[in-house]
Image (cartoon, rainbow, N blue to C red):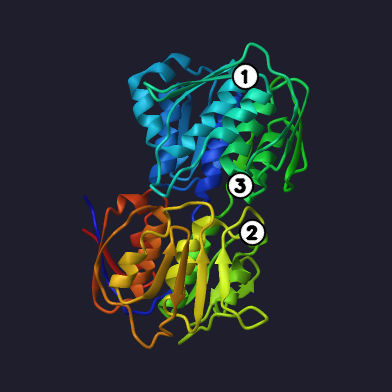
Amino acid sequence: MNCFEIEGGHRLNGEITPQGAKNEALQVICAVLLTSEKVTINNIPDIVDVNNLIDLLGEMGVVINRLNRNTCEFTAANVNLEFLQTKEFKKRASSLRGSIMIMGPLLARYGKAYFPKPGGDKIGRRRLDTHFIGFEKLGARFNFDAEDIFYTVEASEMKGTYMLLDEASVTGTANVLMAAVLTPGTTTIYNAACEPYLQQLSRMLIAMGAKVTGVGSNLLTIEGVKELNGCNHTILPDMIEVGSFIGMAAMTSSEITIKNVGVEHLGIIPMMFQRMGINLQIKGDDIYIPSQESYEIDTFIDGSIMTIADAPWPGLTPDLLSVFLVVATQAKGSVLIHQKMFESRLFFVDKLIDMGARIILCDPHRATVIGLNKETALRGAVLTSPDIRAGVALLIAALSAQGKSTIQNIEQIDRGYQNIDQRLQNLGARIRRI
């Protein structure tokens, strides 16, 4: 098992460019199953989760031509549906949660889809009800084999309809949207997720010939078409990486420029970091963070402690709350971090407390952080990455800490961040893979 060994307490300097957005990549790569024609996708992040999905599609019969590490051509002319019943498919698909989104395209194109219970990060329960209720509203029949832990969705005939999603699930919306584009009639999806990932998926489907209106809102209307064609699509920069680099710069008092961030798609993220007291400047499509000796957390207008909470877009993405929490440990002031969506994502704070952070874990969803104002540095420690986002938060903490830290289980970090050690080395970070 590989580890990161980090000598903290050193300032970084230079430019860094975010990878393509992982969450978008998982959606648009699944969408290639909707057509027999060639689909070219650019700016694909070269990370474990995405590469595993690409390999899975290859096993399903999709012809894949990797032009380079970040550009792929996909041709799903002959999908092997029998492979979906094999033990190999169950093993591969169950290890990657994002691959659940192959179900919508397969249902739309072939009238049936199969899937094992998906795994992924250990961050708490993530229901699949939204996916299957949406499929049923379109006319599909759903069955769950509890003994084999296997989902089956089949439909002899589907028809567009109105549906109100029980939650604004990103992957649920994506799955139902992809099923609807080839379903006859009009489908209206209310309470749809509207994250930039969904907007990008919608734009890709429209480029393929789908008829989708309401893009960017929580009310999508889809006029079903008989078939889709190929297209060329480019993935946005990863907003989670952008936020991680902003937090890293603040924690290490570093001067960093983040290049080509896709500013117009970042939503509330820059403003929330500014409320943490971090000085950042938007220059064209770049973000410049000057070296800061300290940063002070804002308060609410009445002087009460600020709360930072996740929310459906355009609220703050839950994937960045771990970063905000670790950044708060060295701020001046206090903040309440409220992780509403997942009940286990704050369970890495004990590791920060061992490093000297002042954190009160109120319950599985809330933690109060009392900032050290950089008067006392965090201490190096032996750490374990529990999930992708907490792993990067611990990496940021280790870069700012005095002394040596070792982060174990970095396979979690590799699932979401492309060559992160090499890219940080280019900024002057003293990090090595052992």
Crowding at label 1, few (<14), some or many (≥20) Cα neighbours within 10 Å? many
| Disc on the earlier residue, 2 or 3 | 3
Q: Name the residue at 61% across, 24% down.
A: 35
Q: Circle 1 is placed at which residue position?
A: 140
Q: Position of residue 74 (x, y in %)?
A: 52, 30
Q: Residue furthest front?
A: 363
Left or right of 99? Residue 39 is right
Callout 2: few (<14), some (14-19), or many (20+) C-alpha neighbours within 10 Å? few
Answer above or below: position of 432 versus 293: above
Query: To which residue does mark 3 refer?
Result: 197
Residue at disc 1, secondary structure: loop
Q: Residues within 10 Å of mark 3 (few under 14, many from 20)?
A: many
Q: CA distance from mark 1 to mark 2?
A: 32 Å
Q: CA distance from mark 1 to mark 3?
A: 26 Å
**Based on the displayed image, in which of its 4 quarters is residue 132 positioned?**
top right
Amino acid type, label 3: Tyr
User: Is 264 or 166 nearer to us in this picture?
Assistant: 166
Label 2 secondary element: loop
> Left or right of 129: which side holds 183?
right
Quadrant location, the C terminus: bottom left
Disc assigned to residue 62 = none
User: Residue 279 placed where, x, y %?
Assistant: 56, 80
Q: CA separation, marks 2 and 3?
A: 14 Å
Pointer 1 or 3: first along the chain: 1
Dot 2 amino acid type: Gly
Residue at the extreme top: 156
Q: Which mark is residue 315?
A: 2
Q: Which kind of residue does numbered mark 1 sit on?
A: Ala
Residue at image x 61%, y 41%? Answer: 233
**x, y (%) of residue 375?**
38, 88
Count of numbered badges drawn on the protein = 3
